Amino acid sequence: MTFLLSIFLSFCAIGFEPKQHIEHFPWKDALTPVKIITFEGEPKRVEKFYEDRKLNLSIRRVEVGDRHFVTHDSLLQKDECPVVPYKQAHSDLENNIGNLKLNAHGDYFLFQPNHRIHKSCLEKWGRVNFVASYQSAVGADMSCLDELGKRPVTIKNHAGVIANNLRALWQKKPVSIQCNEVMNWTGTAGHASTGPEDKMKTLPGISFPYISISSNDPKVKGNPTEDEKRELGFTIFHEGIHNLGYKHGAGVEYTYACESCCKKTTNKKAKVASCNICIGDYASGAGDKKYLADMLAWGASFDVSLRGDLPMKTAVNYMNETNDRKFGMIALARSTSDIFSPVGLELMQEVKVKIPDSDLTPEERSMIKDSDKDRDLFGILVKFRPEAKVIAHSYVNYYMDQNATTAINNIVANKGMLTKFMARPESGNDTYIASAIKDSLKNVLAGIFLKDYPKRSPDSTRASNLLTEMKLW
């Protein structure tokens, strides 16, 4: 345990480096923390992590001085997404395959640097295919982190820290890679342990550190497509970073960023932004405006490797960390604006009314101007404006005015229209637009539901009831 704590103490979830004390606890229930991080210095900062296994939520409550905020994400740590092809080369592949040896129990292959690969992985993917993808994750992608780690920075280069900590973890304890976990894998390529307290729920005896790959993949046993093989390598690399304690929705988004950067995406703008985030040269981590700007640039690139809700969650977390509602709300509106997402476009219209032009910076005026152009350009979204306006208004109520009661009252007053919209059949591009609107509604209600977690307030109860009644979870 001492070694594991030394790994976790070598970096911090929010990006800067105060000393911290970490405690891990076995899971008991959704209202009892599984991990508590106490940071030294003033103001006092404590982060408490919870797991709601019924709702599949990983919840983080941050207490800073006399205020608090709550963030959340899925317990499963990697969503599936399309992949961008790139050429793989593994000069020592045949030698490594030849060096595979079964252990005494006959269920695992031992593979360097220090991974226990369950036989189900080789059976499902084929020996040559699985090892090639594995080599990409521990070879080419680790080399990418090493190269990023050499770049000069002002504060700290986290890509180098991640690479060094992964190797330190591998040297101390083998990582189990499983492909035989039985669970609902819909929309998920894999998940991984994020701390010493983690154990696989359906496979007794498998504990930290481990990586679990979807047992539904590949679609054809022993004959994966080229895209499936590439995605497997990305998944192993991505989940390996989670083994160091990084979680989605808790600080700088290193896992997706390093994966995107190191998989040699052909999207140049996305590569620059994701590599910047992977390096993580931010003075105040998730509360750094530079980080939010990089995430917005990544989102604006329309890179297929970026999970759609990450820019939005980054903007919300920025407001939580800094209480800068002006830039944060403009960034939130911009992060939820595109041809399939009208809520952000309507949100920007609301924000313009709230903030006098004389208070705007040139950067903020530029973001508003771009949003106005998009709103005029995306005529396809006009039919969805009534629902988008209602949800945008609740975003302003909750995130800008910080009034959860008013935000819920607005949704309740328009519940009939929203419910009718949710039941309305859509086709073609309208299907994606409707889905984005529903996600926006779910996000604001989930934020209110978790606002005082683990405590419950009348607002959180009302939000929970609406989420259930409107079938948003």
Image: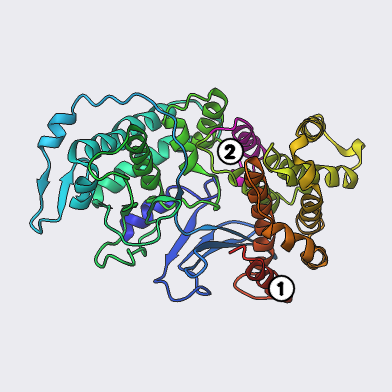
What stretch of residues is rendered in magenta?
282-303
The mark found on residue 282 in the picture is: 2
Q: Main secondary structure of the magenta part?
A: helix
Q: Name the residue tied to disc 1.
A: 462
For label 2, the SS is loop
Quadrant of residue 41 within the rendered picture: bottom right
The residue lying toward the viewer, choosing from 425 and 177, is 425
Q: Identify the amino acid type marked 2.
A: Tyr
Can residue 261 be seen from the camera position used here? yes
Crowding near pointer 2: few (<14 within 10 Å), some, many (20+)?
A: many
Quadrant of residue 300 within the rendered picture: top right
Q: Are marks 2 and 1 in contact (CB under 8 Å)?
A: no
Tell me: 215 left or right of 368.
left
The mark found on residue 363 in the picture is: none
Residue 285 magenta: yes
Can residue 156 be seen from the camera position used here? no
User: Residue at horizontal 34%, vertical 56%?
Assistant: 4
Q: Indicate the position of residue 434 as horizontal and vertical percent values.
A: 67, 49
Image quarter of the N terminus: bottom left
